[in-house]
Amino acid sequence: MPTYYTYAIIHTPTEDAPLPGIGLGLNGRPIELIPVEETGLSLSVSEWPYAYAPPAATNISCILEHENIIERLMLITPVLPVRYGTLIADNEQFKSYLYQHRDAFLANLVHVTGRIEMGVRVFWIPPNLDVETETVATPGRQYLMARAQALSQNEKLYNAAQILADQICERLRKVAFDIRCQRLLTKRMLLSAACLVQKEDIELFRQETLSLCNVYTDLRFTISGPWPAYHFVTTEEKPIHHDNLFRVYR
Amino acid sequence: MDLELAVQQREATLLELLDRVLDKGVIIAGDLTISVANIDLVYLDLRILLASVDTLEKSLDEGLSYIGERDSVI
């Protein structure tokens, strides 16, 4: 039974709209499609001769090649990128899995059609938060007071970040079809946003980010993309909305 | 753009890429995959990668940085 290296889930090409050639896959292997009947879905793969040994996660050239292949696919058809380094061996079992989740994957494909992902990160210098101090008598009390102060500071930081990040997300939302936001992934990273943007609106999105940069002059913005819609794939088992996810920096 | 900034931006783009390729995308159910690259060993802690992005950001230009503007990957 052959082993396959996986790239992306796509619509199964039809006779009316065949998939044009997109060149070779990882390690120069041909790219093939495993269609799943009655779903309209296919998995793009390459046969993988190294059995149980996927490419290493440290292999930057393989990672770049993997991304490059997905981007080439993305130019001709909507894609749901599969996580790097995934090998499958049992086609029938895989087809059953795809069949079982067909509605979610088809909905994802509709969601990303004609759109790309742009990344925005916003950095700040956390404000110096005034925390009331109190003279303490014993080491135990001193420790507890320090813990209480730290917690209070975290909460204030959280609230300040939440307000600022929400304002920026709202502005980005106006030029994005969908958005995933995470706040305070690190102490300085106020916001990390993945935005699903109409292909024709990329320049508009950049302009909006630039205008945000001019409004919030104390913040630093970085923008990246266009990317395949990595943040906008899911199955029924994994909720699609992460807007409320807030990781407090520790 | 000077060479140093170009190198920094390339590194930043690579970090953005790693953040997506190694941590996002479709996860095919574990019992169907015979193996997934030993990402956990490299991607030990998301914060390590994010801290790298954080560090790189400090060295980029003031204002807005287009760290991923590209025709194709990097």
Image (cartoon, rainbow, N blue to C red):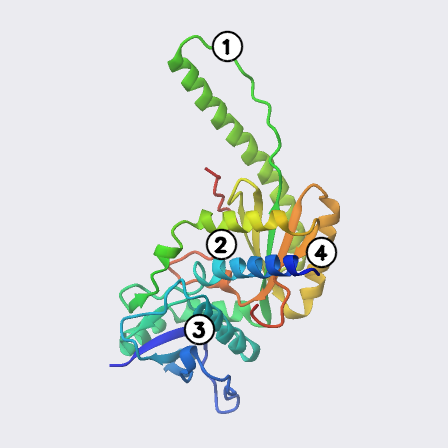
Tell me the amino acid under the disc marked 3: Ala
Q: Distance between the residues labelled 2 and 4?
A: 23 Å
On residue A135, the disc is: 1
Instruction: Pinpoint residue A249: horizontal percent, then vertical percent.
Output: 48, 39
Earlier residue among tags 2 and 3: 3
Question: Element under label 2?
Answer: loop
Q: Is mark 3 on a helix, strand or loop?
A: strand
Mark 2, other Cα within 10 Å: few <14 / some 14–19 / many ≥20 = some
- For residue B9, side relative to residue B27 (left or right): right
Rendered view: A82 above or below A193: below
Q: Mark 4 sits on what residue?
A: A208
Check chain identity for marks 2 and 4: say if they share one.
yes
Residue highlighted by disc 3? A8
> Quick one: label 3, few (<14), some, or many (20+) residues within 10 Å?
many
Above or below residue A88? Residue A119 is above
Quadrant position of the N terminus of chain B in the picture? bottom right
Q: How far apart are marks 2 and 1 (CA)?
A: 46 Å
Q: Is residue A232 left or right of residue B30?
A: right
Which of pointers 2 and 1 lies earlier in the amino acid sequence?
Answer: 1
| Secondary structure under the numbered disc 1 in the rendered image | loop
* Amino acid at circle 1: Thr
Q: Which residue is drawn at 56% across and 21% down?
A: A131
Please tell me the numbered disc located at residue A241.
2
Which of the image's four quarters has the C terminus of chain B? bottom right
Residue B59 in percent (x, y) is at 63, 49
Looking at the image, which residue sits at the far bottom?
A15
> Label 3 to label 4, Cα distance in Å?
31 Å
